[in-house]
Image: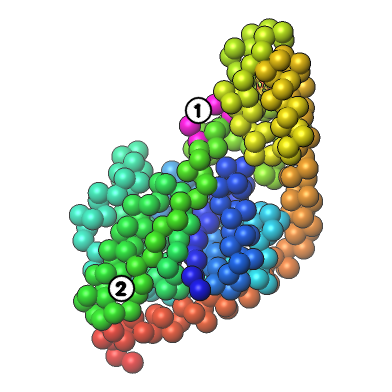
Amino acid sequence: MPRVFSGIQPTGDPHIGNYFGAMKNYVKLGDQLGKNSIYCVVDLHAPTNPSAYDPKFLAQRTFEMAVANMAAGLDPEKVIFFVQSHVPEHTQLAWLFTVITPVGELERMTQYKDKAGKLESTPAGLLMYPVLQAADILLYKADTVPVGEDQVQHIELTREIARKFNHAFGDMFPEPKAVLEKDALRIPGLDGSGKMSKSKGEATTIGILEPLDSIWQKLRVAPTDPARVRRTDPGDPDKCLIGDYHKLFSDLPTLETVYTGCRTAGIGCVDCKKLLLGSMTQELAPIQERAAALRADPDFVRDALVQGAKEARAIAQPVFEEAREKVGFLK
Ligand code: SF4
C-alpha cells in the first residue's frame, strides 16, 4: 500500500483553491489509505521566510489550519494528522541530510531564488527549507507526495537526497514521487488572472471559513465575461470567472441554468452570482459550522493533534534511529 505524506502550511485560513486542490484530496486519500496517509501542519517551515512570518500568530494559525482541515472532513482517527514541531525527529533527520546536500543544489531552487531576491538578508533556514521538506517526507519513508506544481522541484531534490544518503550510508529511503494536486488546474483568483493565491492579497481569494456575507461582497464586484456589456448581451460561462466557480460548486441543474441563461441572456450576472452564492453556501456552510464547533472545543483539537504526534513518532523514531546508526553515531 502506498504511503502518502503531505505538509500543510500554517496559513490559518485556506482558500477555495486549497480546498479543491488539496484538502478534499486529503480526505479522499484518508478514506482509501487510512493511517498510511500522513498529514502534517508544517509550522517549522514558517519562520524561514521573515516576510510572511509573525511569531504572534504562528500558534493561532497552526491551530486554525488544523481546525479548517478537520472541519473539511479530515478525520484524525482515520489518518495521521499532527503538527511538525511536535515531532523532533523532523529537524534531527534534516541535519543528517544537511551534511550531504550541496549548497549549489539548494541555491538553484526557484522558490529560494524568488523569496531570497525580496530580502535584504537571507536566513540560512530559507536555503535549508527543501532539506527539512525532504526530512518531513523521508522520515515516514513516504513514497507518494501530493504537491502543487511549484513544489515539484523540491520533490526532485528529495529524491536526490534519498539517493545520496542510500549511496553514502546504505539503502534505506525510497525515492518518493510527486503527484500533482488539482491546483495545477489553476483555480483562478477573484481578479480573474492566474491561480488563487494569498500572496496576491486577500481581496483576490475566497476563504473556506470566510463569512458568507463577506464572500458575497467579493462576488458582487467580481469581473464577468466582458462580452456582457448590457444585460441583453449573451455571454459565455467558459470565459467567465463566475462560470469557473460554478463548475466547482454547482450541481448539474444549476450549471444548466447558468450555461443556458448566460448564452441566451436569459439571466443577468447578478442572478448568476446569487446562484453561485447558493451553491457555495451548500458546500461551505456545513464546514463553517463544524469549524465553529471545533473552535468551541479547543481541547478536542489539541488532544487529536497530540495523539497524531504520538502516531507519527511511532514511525519516525525507529526510522531516525536507523538513519542515525547508518551514519555511525554512538548508541
Ligand atoms: Fe459570468 Fe454568469 Fe454573467 Fe455568464 S451570466 S457572464 S457566467 S456571471
Q: The C terminus lies in which quarter of the figure?
A: bottom left
Q: Amino acid at mark 1?
A: Ser
Residue 253: which numbered mark, if any?
Answer: none
Residue 29 left/right relative to 321: right
Look at the image and say whether residue 165 sits in the magenta stretch.
Answer: no
Q: Name which quarter of the figure residue 161 lies in.
A: bottom left
**Image position, residue 329 (x, y; %):** 28, 86
Taking depth in this image into account, of 325 and 241 the one nearest to the observer is 241
Q: Is mark 2 within 8 Å of ligand 1?
A: no
Magenta: main secondary structure equals loop
Q: Name which quarter of the figure residue 268 lies in.
A: top right
Q: How is the image coloured?
A: rainbow
| Mark 2 residue element | helix
Q: Residues within 10 Å of mark 1 (few under 14, many from 20)?
A: few
Residue 175 left/right relative to 79: left
* Residue 139 in view: no
Q: In this figure, what is the number of numbered marks?
A: 2
**Image position, residue 56 (x, y; %):** 56, 52
Q: Relative to residue 229, is residue 274 depicted above or below?
A: below
Region rendered in magenta: 190-196
**Image position, residue 76 (x, y; %):** 66, 68
Q: Disc 2 designates what residue?
A: 96
Distance Cα–Cα, label 1 vs label 2: 42 Å
**Nearest to viewer (mark 1 / mark 2):** 1
**Image position, residue 293 (x, y; %):** 79, 57
Q: Disc 1 designates what residue?
A: 193
Q: Amino acid at mark 2?
A: Leu
Residue drawn at x 58%, y 62% is 29
Residue drawn at x 69%, y 25% is 259
Residue 220 left/right relative to 20: right
- Mark closer to the chain start, 1 or 2: 2
